[in-house]
Image (cartoon, rainbow, N blue to C red):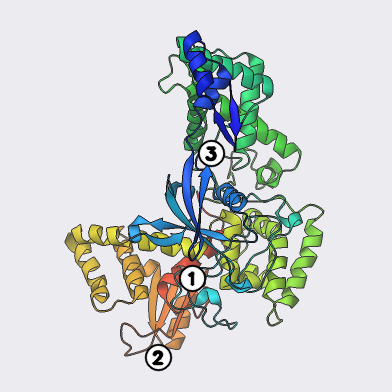
Amino acid sequence: MIFFNHGIFYLLPYSQLISQTNYVSPVFHSLTTMTSPVRLRIILGEQNSQKVILQHGIPTSLSDLSKEIEKQCNLKGHFRLQFMDPDFDNEFMNLMSTSEIQDKSTLKVVFPTTPSDRDSSPTPQLDTSQSRSTCSSPALSLSSCDTLILSSPSTSASSGCVASVSPESSSRIKSSAWPAVFTVPRFAYDAELKLDQGNAAFKTHGTFLSPDPKLKISILDGLAEEIVRYKVYPTNTEFNQVAEALIEKHPCLKERGSANGYSGWKASLKYKLANYRTKLRNIGYTEVTVNSLKHKPAGISSPAYNIKKPRKAEVNYCPSHPLGETPETLEEVRVTLLSEIKKKNNEKTLRMLMDKTFSIRRHEVVKESPPIADFKTRWPALFRTEEICAEFERITTVPLVSTYFAKMDRYSAKLMKIYAKRGGINGQRIKNLLVPTTQTDNIDVRRECILRSLCVYLNEDPSNLMNEYLDTDAPSTQEAIQKTVMGVFVVKIEGSDIEDSPADVGVVLEGVRVLEDLNNVSYATAMLMGLIYTELELPS
């Protein structure tokens, strides 16, 4: 007999009955092999905490975890989660992945205190003038522009760096990257019944299931639909991940004679995805149609030539236009942006218009690869630090600055140990570059030294990434910047000390100063990464 109380199944009497009859029900087997419940301590405020029990284990996505906590704790409004990071003496850090938590972990719920603080880190708000926004402050390690712009269609727009996506503009935008652990979806009802019977027979007698054509089609269709939620061009590793997850959940589907048990399923998945992309191309799915023959250069008749697809963690690579919008209507919105950017204190309107025109910008970058000078003329709002952060998150669903600095600081100690072991000429160059870290505790100086040393460690010239000039020679500085294809420029004050702020720090793309007044090199490199994703077509 099965009892149900407060969301928990009680099966002990039934399990005793099963043990006496030596019969294993597929339903009973699926219930008893469920993921163990996970208990979390949720801090809601000072002297206010609550226990949350996740009956089905830790969710694979952060949004699912947030929804479960919101439901059990009766939370209202927008919030973010922090966890106790053992790498930093259990200090609370922003939770970026559910892989950071385990049973009996402690999480902290952080609510925004003001609209401009929404999803921002607990860093002081600095100068918010037009020339030096909240996203370009000198001491900034976690930027206030790093907000979840794709968390829900109902997210409201607010001032500052807070992003907002209307239901219309976000309806065709993916909200999560490829999961660390692929979750096999539920298939059709009759397919699940056959698989339950097959799994029960496999556990009892070790018998493998030979799926009939209808069952195999149902499995492949279900997996294909789940895959395209994240990608339409999965990598070979990701195909392995899906096929392996399938036979782990349904061991009766393992292939006899296969080295890993899923080689045939992997091959079938590749063919299924190719056919699925054909269906998507026929209905005009832009991420697939961009590779059709009519978009190839003249004289090229090979479909495999210059395939445009996500390569470096892009999630929304070439999204379709919002429902009801056309290139002509979005072009009108772009023209409106040119006038709106001239107005003061207009960040809320700019953000809404930039959200709406996201798809047409991506089409320009992916299909046309325009020169930076022309692209800056068409989209001047995109060359503001807060908009670079927002655009990067639209593309990758990952906050730019907070993630960049969190990862850099996390691995800094290990990098320093690696640098210390490097010998030869490069080892001596690294020691010379790290000298300023022994003379000051300034975090920006430390990060800059680590970045320069990393270039040397990889047998690269740091000047390929960062170039220094003196403020006393402006003409030659400008001439050198115009010859720079891509990099960070630093204009130092003659006779300045290590801790003195430079006269200017900025980013150059194709000889154009796209950003200025960034104040420190480490922040400029973060902005350079954001610009590479938002303005350039990444190479394979």
Q: Which residue is mark 1?
A: 122
Residue 273 visible at all: no
Please, which residue is most extreme toward the left here?
424
Name the mark nearer the viewer: 2 or 3. Answer: 3
Q: Which mark is residue 292?
A: none
Q: Position of residue 185 (x, y in %)?
A: 60, 32
Q: Secondary structure at mark 2?
A: loop
Image quadrant where one finds the N terminus:
top right
Considering depth in this image, is 224 or 296 the residue closer to the camera?
224
Residue name at image x 33 percent, y 88 percent: 496
Q: Earlier in the sequence, mark 3 or mark 1?
A: 3
- The residue type indicated by label 3 comes to Gln
Report if residue 369 is visible in the image: yes
The kind of residue tagged 2 is Thr
Q: Nearer the viewer, residue 322 or 303?
A: 322
The kind of residue on which mark 1 rests is: Pro
> Helix, strand, or loop for circle 3?
loop
User: Residues under labels 2 and 3: Cα distance?
Assistant: 66 Å
Q: Which residue matches tag 3?
A: 55
Residue at image location 34% in from the left, 57% down from the top: 87
* Pair 3/1: label in front: 3
Residue topped by disc 2? 472
Separation of residues labelled 2 and 1 (CA atoms): 38 Å
Asked whether disc 2 touches disc 3, contact meaning CB atoms under 8 Å apart, the reply is no
Helix, strand or loop under label 1: loop
